[in-house]
Image (tube, rainbow, N blue to C red):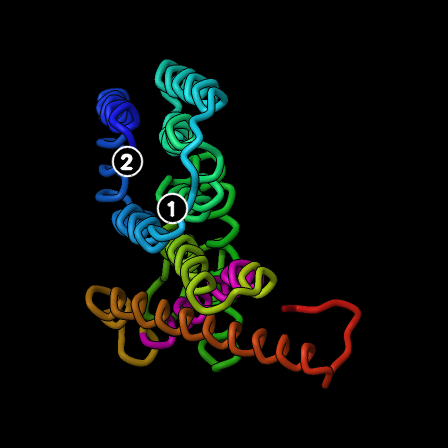
């Protein structure tokens, strides 16, 4: 890498930090204050590791600066300005990732983007979902978790009545709040599934299946958590639904969901192997 490229990189990094200092601070605040996105602290370090993993391929890639990268860079800065003026943080945060992509394109060329596309795309997972979309997802999940919990408790012969997201038991009422909707485990589990698929299989179809499986897995796992909380409150009293037991159940359910994700990968990989070997002959191939 020549002196001109190093100077250009240094200038771009300095300009990037100057332009996005407020966006970065707000982003870290969201990770700190909003438990739904606490995994955001891990996304950037993992993306850097994925870049380091590609260091040999990067050394073999020819540096060919592209003026189109400058055009994209200007577009991202305009997006930042528009998001800042409109107080629309999602656009500003997406422009942060877009600026990194455009800067690499401008300084090093499209070849570097082809090598780094996955780490760069992975950075998007650190950005919180817009509130308008988040609320449209969270509330239905609250109702699904509530209904799942009610029906499971009824099957266990526990007297239960549900009104919306409120589950009424004999000795207490359970309010399935937004934090208990399953959106937190869904967001974290999706991030985990992307990494898990990347490191454990080369099949694009299996990776897509793993990502898609996070939705039903998170719904069922969280529904079981609600039902388990209600059952614990029925047997041992209200304390079983509060404090340490409530927090521990969240971690336990996430572990179960992660194991279910592993089971999906095992079944999908085994099926793909059978199709390849000719034991089964479907119209398509999972591998």
Where residue 1 sits, quadrant-wise, is top left
Q: In the rendered view, would you say 251 is above or below 3? A: below
Q: Which comes before the other along the chain, label 2 or label 1?
A: 2
29 lies left or right of 177:
left
Residue found 50% across the figure and 66% down from its top:
217
Q: Is residue 1 magenta?
A: no
Residue found 38% across the figure and 76% down from its top:
231
18 lies left or right of 275:
left
Residue assigned mark 2: 27
Q: Secondary structure at mark 1?
A: helix
Q: Is residue 219 magenta?
A: yes
Residue found 40% across the figure and 47% down from its top:
60
| Quarter of the picture holding the C terminus | bottom right
Residue 17 visible in this rendered orientation of the protein:
no
Q: Main secondary structure of the magenta part?
A: helix
Q: Position of residue 51 (x, y in %)?
A: 34, 49
Residue assigned mark 1: 58
Q: Position of residue 64 (x, y in %)?
A: 44, 30
Where residue 63 sits, quadrant-wise, is top left
């Amino acid at each position: 890498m020549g002196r001109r490229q190093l100077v250009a990189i240094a200038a771009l990094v300095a300009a990037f930090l100057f332009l996005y200092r407020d966006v970065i601070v707000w982003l870290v605040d969201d990770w700190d204050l909003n438990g739904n996105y606490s995994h955001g602290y891990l996304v950037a370090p993992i993306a850097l590791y994925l870049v380091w993993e590609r260091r040999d391929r990067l050394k073999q890639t020819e540096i060919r600066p592209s003026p189109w990268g400058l055009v994209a860079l200007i577009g991202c800065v305009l997006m930042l300005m528009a998001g800042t003026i409109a107080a629309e943080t999602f656009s500003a945060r997406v422009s942060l990732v877009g600026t990194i992509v455009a800067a690499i394109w401008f300084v090093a060329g499209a070849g570097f983007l082809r090598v780094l596309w996955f780490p760069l795309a992975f950075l998007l997972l650190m950005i919180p979902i817009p509130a308008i979309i988040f609320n449209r997802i969270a509330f239905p999940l609250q109702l699904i978790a509530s209904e799942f919990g009610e029906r499971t408790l009824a099957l266990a012969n526990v007297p239960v009545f549900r009104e919306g997201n409120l589950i009424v038991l004999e000795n207490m009422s359970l309010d399935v709040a937004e934090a208990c909707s399953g959106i937190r485990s869904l967001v974290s589990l999706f991030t985990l599934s992307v990494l898990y698929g990347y490191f454990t299989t080369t099949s694009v179809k299996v990776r897509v299946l793993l990502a898609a499986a996070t939705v039903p897995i998170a719904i069922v796992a969280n529904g079981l958590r609600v039902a388990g909380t209600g059952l614990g409150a029925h047997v041992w009293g209200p304390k079983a639904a509060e404090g340490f037991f409530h927090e521990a159940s969240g971690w336990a359910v996430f572990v179960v969901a992660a194991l279910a994700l592993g089971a999906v990968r095992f079944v999908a990989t085994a099926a793909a192997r059978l199709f390849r070997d000719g034991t089964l002959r479907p119209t398509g191939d999972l591998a």
